[in-house]
């Protein structure tokens, strides 16, 4: 193998990682949702199965138990006391557990987070930033692969500002 080929082999993974980077953090850091368990709980009972019809194997799949929490900024919209869209600074946290046992033990939830950004910040995602993991290490807005992946499903909830779980959902609207 010549020097040129070796250089290409070494550079291609670096270029791919840079392209797939989700470091385009626009919203707050992970400490912004560290106390989410004290927020408004949007799911009166844990959500199971696929209540939206769009879940498939995402968010721990069909056997998962999920709870949704909304910070005080987004609570009035989620409760139906204020119209859509959600206000800038809204944070929605979804806990997903593999099954009933892990839910009851509150063991190892997968967190997925949505942060409402300032209007016009990320038109490709309707100004939402999507985050996987409590540490916020996998983030996506704009044209990042992470955001495109998440937002492609959330477009089905465009009428409720791309959030599936809210007071309208439980009211059967």
Image (tube, rainbow, N blue to C red):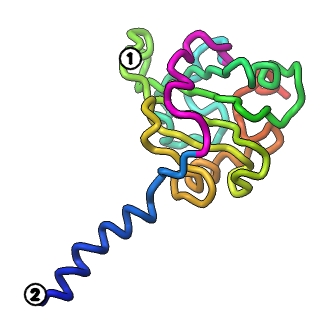
Residues at marks 1 and 2, CA–CA distance in whole angstroms:
51 Å
* Disc 1 packing (10 Å; few <14; some 14–19; many ≥20): some
Q: In this view, does 156 lie above or below 15?
A: above
Which residue in the structure is indicated by mark 2?
Answer: 1
The residue sitting at 70% across, 57% down in the picture is 124
Location of residue 33 in the rendering, given as x and y in whole percent from the top left corner:
55, 24
Q: Which residue is drawn at 67% across and 45% down?
A: 154
Instruction: Identify whether 1 is placed above or below 65.
Output: below
**Viewer-nearest residue: 166 or 74:** 74
- Dot 1 or dot 2: first in sequence order is 2
Task: Look at the numbered disc 2 and give the secondary structure of its residue.
Answer: loop
Which residue is label 1 attached to? 102
**Residue 167 picture quarter:** top right
From the viewer's perspective, is residue 77 above or below residue 164?
A: above
The image shows residue 39 at horizontal and vertical percentages of 63, 13
Q: From the viewer's perspective, is 52 left or right of 37?
A: right
Q: Height in image: 87 above or below 121? A: above
Front one among 44 and 127:
127
x, y percentage for residue 10?
A: 22, 73
> In terms of depth relative to the viewer, which is nearer, 58 or 15?
15
Q: Does residue 79 appear to the left or right of 138 in the view shown?
A: right
Q: Element type at marker 1?
A: helix
- Residue 33 in the magenta stretch? The answer is yes
Of 155 and 144, nearer the camera is 144
Mark 1 vs mark 2: in front: 2
Indicate the position of residue 11 as horizontal and vertical percent values. Answer: 28, 74
Q: Give the range drawn in magenta.
A: 26-42
Q: Quadrant of the C terminus?
A: top right
Q: Does the magenta stretch include residue 86?
A: no
Q: Which residue is drawn at 17% across and 81% down?
A: 6
């Amino acid at each position: 193998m010549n020097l040129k080929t070796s250089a290409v082999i070494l550079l291609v993974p670096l270029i791919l990682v840079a392209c797939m980077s989700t470091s385009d953090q626009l919203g707050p850091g992970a400490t912004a949702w560290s106390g989410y368990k004290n927020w408004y709980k949007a799911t009166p009972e844990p959500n199971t199965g696929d209540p939206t019809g769009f879940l498939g194997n995402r968010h721990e799949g069909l056997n998962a138990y999920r709870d949704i929490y909304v910070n005080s900024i987004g609570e009035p919209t989620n409760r139906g006391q204020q119209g859509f869209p959600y206000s800038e600074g809204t944070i929605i946290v979804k806990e997903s557990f593999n099954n009933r046992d892990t839910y009851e033990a509150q063991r190892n939830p997968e967190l997925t987070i949505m942060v409402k950004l300032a209007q016009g910040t990320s038109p490709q995602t309707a100004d939402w930033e999507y985050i996987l993991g409590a540490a916020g290490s996998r983030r996506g807005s704009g044209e990042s692969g992470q955001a495109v992946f998440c937002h492609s499903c959330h477009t089905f909830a465009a009428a409720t500002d791309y959030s599936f779980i809210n007071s309208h959902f439980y009211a059967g609207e």
